[in-house]
Structure formats: structure tokens, C-alpha cells
Image: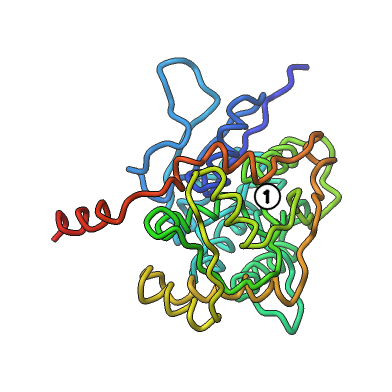
Amino acid sequence: MKKFKPTIVVFGCTGTVGKEVMRQLNTCDCMVRGVLRHPERPYPVPIGSYPSNITYVSADLNSGSQLKEACIGADALFLLTATSPNQIEHEINIIDAARQSGIKRIVKLSAPVIHSPAKVEVSQWHGEIDDYLLRNFDEFCCLRPHSFMQNWERNTFTIRYFGKIYGALGNAQRNYIDCRDVATVAVNYLLAREELKQRSVILAGPQAITNIEMAAKLSHITGSKIEYVDITPEELFSQLTNKAKLPKWLATHIVELDELAIKVPEPARDTITDLILRKPRIMDEYLQESRHLFKRKPLWKLFSTISIIF
């Protein structure tokens, strides 16, 4: 009897992890359907004139009918939407559509479970979604990374123009994992032939690193002095909202993550070697590949850019 290729639906296919899930599935023996929130979004994996296992659909995350259409005929689903106050509603809508469309397996990108006295609001959002998934789906797995190496790209502005990293981490360490390694775990679970037994998997990278150590690493790869400036949580929140113009919920999230690492030590070594069948990427590898993003720029270039805008 001829074996049919599984069809995998990928939500969040243009995001940091979702894009890499698409790239890796592109080389697998399956059909892949990326879901775009907006039809005009560029495809994360381009479709050429040659035959491809990649297709795309667009769907409004508030439309049950469009979400069901996106899920028709699929076997498994990667669940990830943009982190926002609407995330609970959007991901529950997707879970409902997946169940109604007959999808058998969901692999969800979630967050670590946080216990009191620590508090991370975004983790609470994930907790509500995870609980809903538990009540409404038989086969699923929630992947729980602490932080992505690629999140350092949020700091490129102050690093490039001022040679500064601002944070409220003190001497505490954060555990970082490369999004490509997270994607590999997700792809392995999406395509697993056996039923998924683990419903929750903590994903830790190979090292726990302080911001002081990160400043030294960045100084090395850029050839310029990069300094970590430790400030209070209140000062960090003010900088993120007033200078970086981040929404308050996102600024709060960044501050809460620093406070969490101080209160609850993060893993010092990886948990994924057995899941990806190789050692995970280390921070120095990521920084070497991405050094162009952090290279120092003279301040006059910033001021000349501002003058052109205004």
C-alpha cells in the first residue's frame, strides 16, 4: 500500500522560529502549509517554478471559518502566534479549528512554567492556552525554551550606536537557545511516527550567560568595546517605553524576564542533545554568524538619518 505524505500546517510561519520550521520541513518527506495573517506578507520560504512541498494560505486569526479552511486535510499543526495581549484568544481559536478539522497532533511553542514569587505575565498567557489544549486535545506537546539567542537582536540599536547593553539582570545568568535548534525539536515532534508521550518539554541551551559575559563576547566579535550597564527595573522599563517606544506589555515582559533570572536560576546546560541527536549551537556560533548586526556605527550616521527623516 502506498504511504501518504503527512501534511503539516505551520502557524507563525514568518516568525523567528516558525520561519526556521518551514525551512527544515522543506527538506522533509511531507507537505507543508504555511499560514499567513496577511496575504501580502513575503513568503518565508520562496516558491519557485520547480515543484515544492511548500504552499501558503492566509487566514484571519479571529475567523473560525478561515482557520478551519487553513487546517483542512492536515495531520499535524505547529502552533505559534505573535506574542501579544490577543495571543490567548488567537491560539484558542486555532486549537478549536484544528480539532474541528480533524488534526490529530499539535506541537506548541510555549514558555517555562513560572511559580510564585516570580511572575511573568506572558508565561501566564501561555499557561491558559496550554490548559485549554490539555482539556481539548489528545495528542500534543508544549515546547518550553527560556530565551532565544536571536532575541539579542532587540539590543542592536544601543550596541551599534552607543556601545551599551542596558538591563536589570545584575550578575544573574540567562539560558539562551538558538531558534534553529528549537525548530529542529519541533520538526522531529511534528513528523514523529509514534504517538507523542511527553506533553511538556523544557528546552535549554548549552550555557547560562550573564550580561557582563555577553558584553565581552560582543566586544570580541565586533572589535569594539561593548559595556553592560546595570540599571534598576524601573529605569529599564522607562527606557523601553520612553526611548525605545515599546508597548507597556512588552516592556513589562522584558523587565520580568530579568527579574525571573535573578529569582530562579536558569539551567546551566542543555536539555536537547538527545532530542536533536547532536550538540546544540553555542552563543559564540550565533554571534559569529550575526556579527554584522552588532557592528559599531559612528553617532553621526544616526544623526544624519534623523535629519533626513525630519
* Lateral position of residue 68 relative to residue 199, left or right: left
In the figure, residue 262 lies in which quadrant?
Answer: bottom right
| Residue nearest the observer in this picture, 243 or 163 | 163
Residue 283, position in %: x, y? 65, 46
Indicate the colouring scheme.
rainbow
Residue at image location 76% in from the left, 73% down from the top: 264
| Residue nearest the observer in this picture, 308 or 110 | 308
Q: Is residue 30 above or below residue 274?
A: above
Q: Is residue 31 above or below residue 150?
A: above
Give the quarter of the figure containing the N terminus.
top right
Residue 122, position in %: x, y? 59, 70
Q: Secondary structure at mark 1?
A: strand
* Lateral position of residue 143 relative to residue 98, left or right: right
Q: Is residue 43 above or below residue 50?
A: below
| Residue nearest the observer in this picture, 173 or 130 | 173
Residue at image location 53% in from the left, 56% down from the top: 81
Residue 66, position in %: x, y? 45, 51
Under mark 1, the amino acid is Ile
In the figure, residue 138 lies in which quadrant?
Answer: bottom right
Total numbered circles: 1
Q: Is residue 80 above or below residue 164?
A: above
Residue 271, position in %: x, y? 82, 50
Give the quarter of the figure containing the C terminus.
bottom left
Residue at image location 77% in from the left, 69% down from the top: 265
Other-residue count near label 1 (Cα within 10 Å), few / some / many at <14 / 14–19 / ≥20: many
* Lateral position of residue 33 relative to residue 248, left or right: right
Which residue has dot 1 on it? 177
